[in-house]
Each structure stands twice: as C-alpha cells, then as structure tokens.
Amino acid sequence: MADPFHIVCPHCDAVNRVAAERLADKPVCGKCAQELFVGKPLDVNSARFDRHVGRNDIPVLVDFWAAWCGPCRMMAPAYAQAATRLEPHARLLKVDTEASQDLAARHAIRSIPTIALFQGGREIARQAGAMDAGSLVAWVQRSARAA
C-alpha cells in the first residue's frame, strides 16, 4: 500500500491524509466533513495559496488572472472544465493578481493569464496565454509526468 497523500480541504483548509487508492472515492474532510474535491477551481488569497501549494501532495495548477483581462475571462470556462477533468489528481487554484499583488510579484507574473504548475511546494512548469480545456489537461499531465 502506498503512502497516503496530504490533501488540503477546499472549505476549511485542514490537511487530510487520504490513501492514494481512495482519492477517487469522494473523500471528505476529517475536520468539516465536506468533500475534498469539488470539481471547480478555488479562488485563493496569499495565505490559502501557500497552504494549498505547500501542503497538497497532488499537483496544484494555478491560474494567475485579473478581472480586466479579456483573455483571462475567455479562458475561465475552460479552466473550470479542466478542474472537472483533473480532480482528484490535481488541485486547481485561481489567483486574482489585482487582489493578491504580493503573489503576482513573488512569482514574477509578467503577463496574464499565466498558468503555473506546482508539485511539492515548488513550481515545475509555467505557460503564458489562454488555453482551451483539452490543452490545459494535456499540458498538466505532460508536465506532471516530466517532473
């Protein structure tokens, strides 16, 4: 039996241990009893970002975006669709670069949308520009395997 994964709850941010073979069984949080995978991206601030990127054992995909960005708004439905296809094997986050300018600066976001993939707390891949859902899923799977 493989070591359990640490999965951060999208509701209360508690860290849960889930057996790898149970990820697809709709696991619930041991603290708040809500589902650990909701099939949609989570909007996060700096504290939640650090918790999810640093404590999840599954890859974490982050969309750095802003409300005034046309390509960001165009990509939002595709990103949401990708969440339904990638969970429970990845967590998808959204960071509003206007509301969380510290995160944008810390990660040297120069253009938006920028998609970054994190594994084990570190960035392993980055892609600038809007992508459709199929391209996002393929890119994440390819990048996670290569890491």
Image (tube, rainbow, N blue to C red):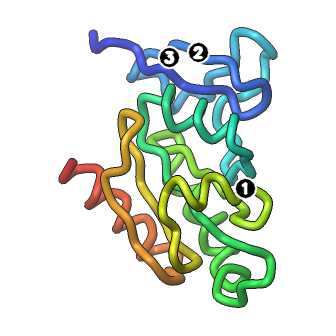
Tag on residue 100? 1
User: What residue is shown at x 62% (from left), y 29% (from top)?
Assistant: 26
Single out the mark in the foreground, 2 or 1: 1
Q: Secondary structure at mark 2?
A: strand
Q: In the rendering, at what x and y percent does residue 124 appear?
A: 31, 52
Say which amino acid is labelled 3: Val
Residue 46, compared with residue 70, is above or below; it is above
Q: CA distance from mark 3 to mark 1?
A: 30 Å
Tag on residue 111? none
Q: In the rendering, at what x and y percent does residue 48 appear?
A: 69, 36
Residue 93, compared with residue 23, is above or below; it is below
User: What residue is shown at x 55% (from left), y 44% (from top)?
Assistant: 91
In front of the other: 82 or 55: 55
Lower sequence index among marks 2 and 1 = 2
Q: In the rendering, at what x and y percent does residue 10 appear?
A: 71, 34
Q: Secondary structure at mark 1?
A: loop
Are the residues at dot 3 and dot 1 in contact (C-beta closer than 8 Å)?
A: no
Neighbour class for label 3 at 10 Å: few (<14), some, many (≥20)? some
Q: CA distance from mark 2 to mark 1?
A: 26 Å
Say which amino acid is labelled 1: Ser
Query: Which residue position holds label 3?
Result: 18
